[in-house]
Image (cartoon, rainbow, N blue to C red):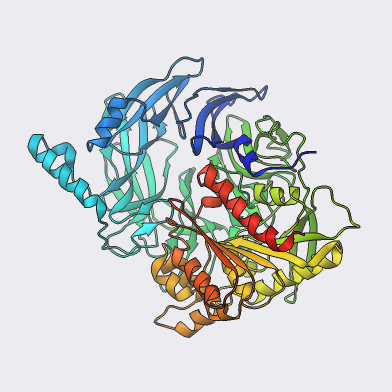
Amino acid sequence: MEKILDTDLQHYRFLSALELLPGGKQAVLVCSMADMEQNNYRSDLHLLDVATGKTKALTTRGDARSFAPYGSQSVIFPAIREEGDRQKIAQGDLLTVFYQIPFDGGEAKEAFRLPLAGASAHKIGEDRYLITAVHDNARPDFASMKGEAREKAWQQYQEEKDYQVCDEAPFWANGRGFTNKKRNRLWLYDAKKKKLTPVTEPMFETRAWAVSPCGKQLAYAGALVDGKLNMYSGIYVYDIETGDTRQLFAPDRYSSVYAMTYLGDQIIFCAEEHGPDWMRFGGTNLYSVDPASGQVKMEVPVAESQDFGGNPGSDCRYGGGIKMKAVGDALYYVSNYAHDSAINVWRPGQPAQRLTGEDCSVDFFDLRDGTALTVGFAGNDLQEVYKLDLESGRQKKLTKYNAAALKNKYVATPEPVSFVNKEGNTIEGWVLKPMDYDPAKKWPAALDIHGGPRATFGTCFFHQMQTMASDGCFVMFCNPTGSGGRGDAFADISGRYGTIDYEDLMQFVDVVLEKYPAIDPKRLGVLGGSYGGFMCNWIIGHNQRFAAAASQRSIASWITLFGTCDIGLSFDLREVQATPFTDMYKMWDQSPMKFANRAKTPTLFINSTEDYRCWMPEGISMFTALQLNNVPTRMCIFKGENHELSRSGKPRHRVRRLREIRQWLYHYIME
């Protein structure tokens, strides 16, 4: 068997945007691969034959990340391919060109172009598309200017690019950069008439949408945002024929509305429900709203036992797909159950039922004309497409996208380890044994801590962990109190970070050491990102049982994070149950920085310059505190990356990150 290497990342295929075509006999999806030479990802459209599982590439240039049906035998996708179009954009034009590619082969041809930047199209009727794009309210309307006036305005705009003026809070968002005056907006495009019509207002932030079965109504969720972010979403209905808009309910109660659909004449949406002070803890449930009366009703209390739309952690995904869809009288949706994810089915008046089993964690799916397909992980495999039997819930693998990538490679099988904590809850965990494991020898081990904290680990293939197992290191990971997939009661550690969650992690290490006596307790490392980075910072300030730590995109102080990160006004307020103005001492007591002067563990800190979720000062603060106490430290800052570095960062950056972590930890835990 061969080792799994950092660079094997370039051989994995990441699947997304699966969509069945009318008749259910074919599907289109996006297949992406890391390109180490160009340091980016190549994404192309593939056509899948459902009967045979055979696929063929429709595009080959690596620039097709989304698509929409165009007629019955072709699709369209957005791209900028011509040098002339690139020059127009460089000179101030807003432009997205949509190309048509037929299923039977041939070159892509231009279908239409829109005066919008980075637009995506979604077919909602004959020759009719819903267009989504970001609208920049601070950008002058150069299209309305001519000649010398336009040239002067463009030059002035270019000069202003060295400055970022902000008058909103927050003014940035992870993965989107500076968002001041920028809004996700909706338009309708009639391809036959070549007419583009705005649906939402320029300052309205759109978060989800759905089209009625009759095709005459468009429901959308969001809020008019001007100044401080409105974290709530209202729901509105737009009459496609008349252009009239009605508000069903105001943006003052429900948040996290990112999926909507029509089920019959009712609108189903996912949401978190909060009180006016935002401090009520709770996960995502499914609600209905009557378009006629605006009455809202909770339909499925998903958050009582699972997490809507969630998946167990993996660093081998790139893009997503359908998480919720109504078919006939039933609603199908994906949710996370502790350590896996499944499709559930719900019909009004009946309890929701889990449809798929534990043999495969479903990332996303599509159903059409009696055919159901899923994309997910099973066993030790990477992502593949599966055909789902709607009666039995069984899934059959259709594709072999990643068969060659893992052939003859050592893939460690996660071995379950669980225990009951002091609150009486079973804590699930797993261990990966090192390659060439010999129980007569002593081995190093690393504790990997997930983010969230309402995230989960499971048995999905995890490249980072597998490389460490291939290198001869035990890898241990678990879902402590605060993790997702088990309902609100288990997930709620608001106001008590660093207590029961910390105790669970330490007890898990004790249980693993007892079960695997071949692990050398003096050669333990710990690593984690986001909440996992918070916990690394907390651990090194509370014990010295680990020989080394790797803290990534971490949290040092809830006080500083509150005013700087993109979710400080929402997530941080709810999780800590305080603000600097209501109880600064409570925030400080839950901050790793308070205990940083006790730390003696050699620690690597990894941050990214455009991570606006766990902002660079957090890692820098901990790094500086340890430096002052002469603790061995190293800091690696990735330029141009954000909070998603480990999952969708540039390929060479991801490889460098893995090497930084392993070289640092191995220096202290390997013989």
Specify the quadrant of the image occupied by residue 326.
top right
- Report the residue at 42% width, 24% height from top: 70
Quadrant in the picture for the C terminus: bottom right
Estimate the x, y position of residue 162 in percent, counting from the top left.
25, 53
Image-based side of 32 in relation to 401, left or right: left
- Residue 453 appears in the picture as rendered: no
Quadrant position of the N terminus in the picture:
top right
* Residue beneath the point at 46% across and 14% down: 106
Q: Residue furthest left?
A: 148
Residue 256 location (% of width, % of height): 46, 57
Indicate the position of residue 94 as horizontal and vertical percent values. 26, 37
Query: Looking at this view, is 345 or 318 the one in front?
Result: 318
The x and y percentages for residue 31 are 55, 32
Of residues 366 and 539, the one nearer the viewer is: 539
Judge left or right: residue 185 versus residue 456. Answer: left
How many numbered dots are placed on residues in this image?
Answer: 0
Q: Is residue 533 visible?
A: yes
Kindly indicate the quadrant of the structure image that contains residue 122: top left
Image point (50%, 33%), residue name: 42
Residue 414 shown left or right of residue 256 in the figure: right
Residue at screen point 17% across, 40% down = 142
